[in-house]
Image (cartoon, rainbow, N blue to C red):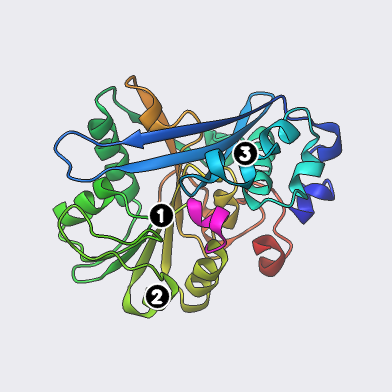
Amino acid sequence: MSRVLAGRLGPDPRTLRIAVAFTTSQAVRHDGRRGGYRNEVLSLRLDRAVGSCAVEPGALSDGALSEGAVDDCAGADVARLLEHPLTPVRVAALDAYLMHVTPHTPENGALPRSLPAGSSVEKSRARAKAVVELLDVRPGQTVLVVGVVNSLLEALRSRGVPYIPCDLKGGRTEWGEPIVTDALAELDCCDAVLASGMTLGNGSFEPLREHALRVGKQLVMFAQTGSAVLPRFLGVGVSAVCAEPYPFFWLDGGPGVIHRYGNGHGYRDGYRHGHRSGHPSGDLDGRTEAAL
């Protein structure tokens, strides 16, 4: 955010205004699944780009975000929203700006992956397969899954990969497994981490990134929240990203596309090592600054 505000990654954010601010609220119960879930997302449109940040269910309809925040965002310049008191607004604004200056294209290191048309569960499984392919784990290695999505767990199970399901809401998985609620407490018990972009909005991303960077552990992100933000952390804690900008797969039964970065999927060699030539910002002056 400090780099954007300083104009180091593209146009002065004070000269760019958000044209449209909107929210998406959805409830899901797939055929053949015992449980369901809800999604609530704040999205901001900047020219052709849409930045998004998912929040805990109820926050958009009952919480602070419903108290004029969406109206505040429409017509506001990006710089003001990057300093907004609400974290989801800041994340969505940063995502929109970075999507505007470095969209998900092969030139910016992204490899597109088509999602076929189908039912909600069919598209969910197709996305899960694309996400899990980004993991590089050996037999017997355990993956900590932060942000439980049953299709992702199903994909791991089909490959015989042990996992620890973690989600703030707790409960049990489709297969009756207990879901832990403290991801940080489980980091020493896993060999790799597969985490939702929602961690950007709830403040848990940075501890995951720091741990992965410190111990050299894989951190793969599946991101509807911050899909243009998280590729910036490749080589500084993040191993790979499955980026899914708005509109998300669960909004439409037609074909779609996601974009993969890292672990051999659509990134330049410099990406892996954090070299300037491979970083999408074209500016990686220091790993600490890049991570802030």
C-alpha gap between disc 1 and disc 2: 21 Å
Above or below residue 268? Residue 52 is above
Q: Where does residue 159 sit, x and y in percent of width and height?
A: 17, 55
Mark 3 / mark 1, whichever is N-terminal:
3
Q: Amino acid at mark 3?
A: Ser
* Left or right, 24 with reference to 174: right
Q: Which residue is mark 1?
A: 263
Quadrant showing the C terminus:
bottom right
Q: Which residue is mark 3?
A: 66
C-alpha gap between disc 3 and disc 1: 39 Å
Q: In this rendered view, identify the residue nearer to me: 176 or 289.
A: 176
* Left or right, 62 with reference to 74: left
Q: Amino acid at mark 2?
A: Leu
Tell me, for residue 196, which label it has, or none: none
Q: Which residue is mark 2?
A: 187
Q: Amino acid at mark 1?
A: Asn
Above or below residue 71? Residue 169 is below
Label 2 crowd bin: few (<14), some (14–19), many (20+), radius 10 Å: some
Could one spot residue 5 in this view of the protein?
yes
Mark 3 vs mark 1, foreground winner is: 3
Q: Indicate the secondary structure of the residue bearing disc 1.
A: loop
Label 3 crowd bin: few (<14), some (14–19), many (20+), radius 10 Å: some
Whether residue 22 appears in magenta in the rendering, the answer is: no
Could one spot residue 113 in this view of the protein?
no
Residue at (67%, 55%) from the top-left corner? 276
For the record, the magenta segment spans 198-204
Q: Where does residue 65 sit, x and y in percent of width and height?
A: 63, 42
